[in-house]
Image: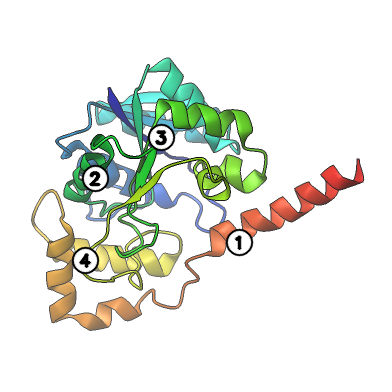
C-alpha cells in the first residue's frame, strides 16, 4: 500500500498558524494540500500526521472534515512521527508531503511515484537536484528505507527533516525526477507572509481544481511581476537552523 503522510502542525516558528491561513475565502492552506493530494491516481491512503499538542486539535478537525486518517506523534522528532504512523497504518511505501505546499501538483506526485515503482530506487524525489519550483516537492521511500533512517539517524536535522539521513549516508539508491526546464528559483510554498500574498494572488486567478503546475506557469507568463512578491526569502532558512542544532549536538556528544 502506498500511503501519503502529510506532516502538519500549527506552531510554525517563522509563520505561526500558516497552514490555517485562508486562501480563497473558503478553504485554508491545509484544505488545499489535502484536496490536491486527493487527485493523485497512485496514492491509496492519505494520513495527516500532527503532534500530540492541544494546539494541533484543529489539525485533526480539518483532517477529519476532509475524510483523512490522522496520527499524532512527537512534535520535534518528525522522523519518529513518520515511522510510527507508517507502522500503524501498515504502509509499504510512503509519500512525504508537507502541509505548507497548497499548490502541490498531483500529476507530479504520480510522476515521482511512477519512477519509484520502476524498482530501481530506495528513495525518489524531485529535489535532488531541484528543477521544480519550491512548493512542488515530492518524496517517496520504501518502508525498509524508513526503518533504516529511524534506527540510524542521530542528528537533529535528520530527525526533524525526515529524509536528511538519506543524503548524509551512502547506502541508499536515490532517484530524481527532473522538470523539463529549471524553475528552482521560484517559490510556491508558504514560509513567510510574502509567500501567502503570492499564493492568494495565484489562486484567485485560477478556477481549475486541482491546480496544476502549467496553470500557475500560464499566469506567471502573463504577470511575471507576481514572482517578485516573495523572491527575497532565503529558501534554506529551515535547514540552516537545523544544522546549527547539529553543531551543538555534536559538540555536546564530543564533550561526554
Q: Going 30% across and 77% down the picture, which residue do you hit? A: 227
Q: Going 15% across and 78% down the picture, which residue do you hit? A: 221
Of 22 and 131, nearer the camera is 131
Crowd rating for badge 2 (residues with CA inside 10 Å; few <14, some 14–19, many 20+): many
Crowd rating for badge 1 (residues with CA inside 10 Å; few <14, some 14–19, many 20+): few
Q: Going 31% across and 39% down the picture, which residue do you hit? A: 120
Q: How far apart are marks 3 and 2 (CA)?
A: 23 Å
Question: On the image, which quarter does residue 130 sit in?
Answer: bottom left
Q: Residue 109 carries which label?
A: 2
Q: Position of residue 100 (x, y in %)?
A: 38, 51
Q: How far apart are marks 2 and 4 (CA)?
A: 20 Å
All told, the count of numbered labels is 4
User: Can residue 238 be seen in the rendering of this structure?
Assistant: yes
Q: Position of residue 106 (x, y in %)?
A: 19, 46
Labels 3 and 2: the sequence-earlier one: 3
Q: Position of residue 133 (x, y in %)?
A: 31, 64
Query: Helix, strand, or loop for circle 2?
Result: helix
Mark 2 against mark 4, which lies toward the viewer? 2
Label 1 close to label 3 by CB (< 8 Å) = no
Q: Quadrant of the N terminus?
A: top left
Labels 2 and 1: the sequence-earlier one: 2
- The residue pinned by badge 1 equals 240
Q: In which quarter of the image is the C terminus?
A: top right
- The residue pinned by badge 4 equals 202
User: Can residue 80 be seen in the rendering of this structure?
Assistant: no
Q: Where is residue 201 in the image (x, y as percent from the top left)?
A: 24, 68
Label 2 close to label 1 by CB (< 8 Å) = no
Task: Single out the residue that lies furthest toward the left.
Answer: 208
Q: How far apart are marks 4 and 3 (CA)?
A: 24 Å
Is 16 displayed left or right of 199 in the figure? right
- The residue pinned by badge 3 equals 59
Amino acid at each position: 500500500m502506498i500511503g501519503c503522510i502529510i506532516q502538519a502542525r500549527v506552531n510554525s516558528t517563522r509563520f505561526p498558524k500558516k497552514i490555517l491561513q485562508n486562501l480563497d475565502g473558503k478553504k485554508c492552506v491545509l484544505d488545499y494540500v489535502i484536496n490536491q493530494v486527493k487527485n493523485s491516481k497512485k496514492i491509496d491512503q492519505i494520513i495527516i500526521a500532527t503532534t500530540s499538542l492541544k494546539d494541533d486539535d484543529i489539525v485533526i478537525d480539518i483532517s477529519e472534515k476532509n475524510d483523512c486518517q490522522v496520527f499524532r506523534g512527537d512534535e520535534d522528532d518528525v522522523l519518529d512521527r513518520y515511522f510510527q504512523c507508517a507502522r500503524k497504518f501498515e504502509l509499504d511505501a510512503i509519500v512525504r508531503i508537507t502541509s505548507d505546499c497548497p499548490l502541490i501538483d498531483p500529476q507530479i506526485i504520480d510522476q515521482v511515484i511512477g519512477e519509484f515503482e520502476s524498482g530501481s530506487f530506495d528513495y525518489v524525489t524531485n529535489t535532488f537536484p531541484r528543477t521544480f519550483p519550491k512548493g512542488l516537492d515530492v518524496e517517496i521511500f520504501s518502508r525498509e528505507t524508513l526503518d533504516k533512517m529511524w534506527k540510524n539517524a542521530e542528528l537533529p536535522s535528520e530527525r526533524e527533516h525526515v529524509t536528511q539521513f538519506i543524503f548524509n549516508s551512502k547506502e541508499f539508491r536515490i532517484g530524481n525526477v527532473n522538470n523539463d526546464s529549471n524553475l528552482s528559483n521560484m517559490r510556491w510554498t508558504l514560509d513567510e507572509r510574502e509567500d501567502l500574498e503570492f499564493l492568494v494572488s495565484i489562486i484567485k486567478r485560477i478556477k481549475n481544481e486541482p491546480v496544476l503546475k502549467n496553470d500557475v506557469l500560464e499566469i506567471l507568463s502573463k504577470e511575471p511581476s507576481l514572482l517578485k512578491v516573495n523572491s527575497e526569502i532565503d529558501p534554506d532558512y529551515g535547514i540552516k537552523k537545523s544544522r546549527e542544532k547539529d553543531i551543538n549536538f555534536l559538540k555536546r556528544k564530543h564533550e561526554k
